[in-house]
């Protein structure tokens, strides 16, 4: 599957600095952050959280050091286990549901320099978002807004000026060209899919898989 890569860290405890010491400086922001995971719902009462990885190997999010939130908080993975397309993760310092619930929706990043270079035909999501989208006939089609996986394969969301976004299966048949250097992708939308919902695109992606049109490999 075309995908992004990622992995792990710790979270500073809130509160005052010890008497006589200045407050600890906030860590410097990442220079070139790459999104590797998003925190979903709290799981149980012991501080575990469901985490959606954006990596080819889901458990790779634990390979690259602390995971960093957009506000600079750092999270260290203590343990994790797979749960279908998600992971159930325990972060250091998050020990009950009250501490876990405020973290829902947090996006987690690592520095690009910590990641391996993607192989041929593999891409980081962050490299694709914002690229211009053209049809195979050379006509402007929109821009990449996001990539999603709702459970039936990767979808690319394309924003179109003055029109609703469309969701296209992220397969070689539908996205035959990805030109990072040229800042564009080329698409050939399946007949009848324009204006489709994610459910329509997922059905198309599933049908393509059954016909042997597999989603391209991911990083």
Image (tube, rainbow, N blue to C red):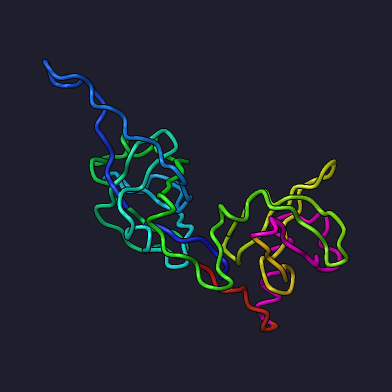
List x then y, in percent, for residue 126: 56, 52
Residue found farthest to the top: 20
Residue at image location 24% in from the left, 32% down from the top: 13
Q: Is residue 95 above or below residue 58?
A: above
Residue 168, quarter of the rendered image: bottom right
Residue found farthest to the bottom: 212
Residue found farthest to the left: 20
List x then y, in percent, for residue 121: 59, 72
Image quadrant in which the N terminus is located: bottom right
Residue found farthest to the front: 181
Q: Residues in magenta? A: 181-210
Residue at image location 74% in from the left, 61% down from the top: 200
List x then y, in percent, for residue 211: 70, 83
Residue 190: within the magenta?
A: yes
Q: Is residue 26 above or below residue 131?
A: above
- Judged left or right of residue 113, residue 205 is right
Residue at image location 82% in from the left, 43% down from the top: 161
Residue at image location 35% in from the left, 35% down from the top: 28
- Judged left or right of residue 114, residue 1 is right
């Amino acid at each position: 599957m075309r995908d992004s890569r990622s992995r792990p860290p710790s979270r500073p405890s809130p509160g005052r600095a010890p008497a006589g010491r200045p407050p600890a400086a906030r860590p410097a922001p990442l220079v070139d952050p790459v999104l590797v995971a998003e925190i979903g719902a709290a799981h149980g009462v012991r501080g575990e959280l469901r985490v959606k990885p954006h990596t080819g190997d889901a458990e790779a999010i634990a390979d690259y050091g602390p995971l960093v939130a957009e506000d600079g908080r750092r999270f260290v993975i203590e343990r994790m286990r797979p749960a279908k397309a998600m992971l159930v993760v325990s972060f250091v310092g998050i020990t009950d549901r009250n501490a876990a619930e405020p973290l829902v929706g947090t996006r987690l990043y690592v520095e690009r320099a910590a990641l391996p270079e993607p192989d041929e035909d593999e891409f980081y999501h962050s490299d694709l978002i914002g690229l211009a989208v053209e049809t195979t006939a050379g006509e402007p089609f929109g821009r990449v807004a996001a990539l999603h996986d709702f459970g039936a394969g990767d979808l690319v969301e394309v924003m179109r000026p003055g029109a609703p976004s469309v969701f296209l299966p992220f397969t070689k048949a539908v996205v035959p060209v990805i030109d990072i250097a040229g800042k564009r992708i080329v698409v050939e939308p399946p007949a009848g899919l324009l204006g489709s919902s994610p459910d329509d695109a997922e059905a198309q992606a599933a049908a393509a898989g059954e016909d042997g049109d597999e989603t391209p490999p991911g990083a």
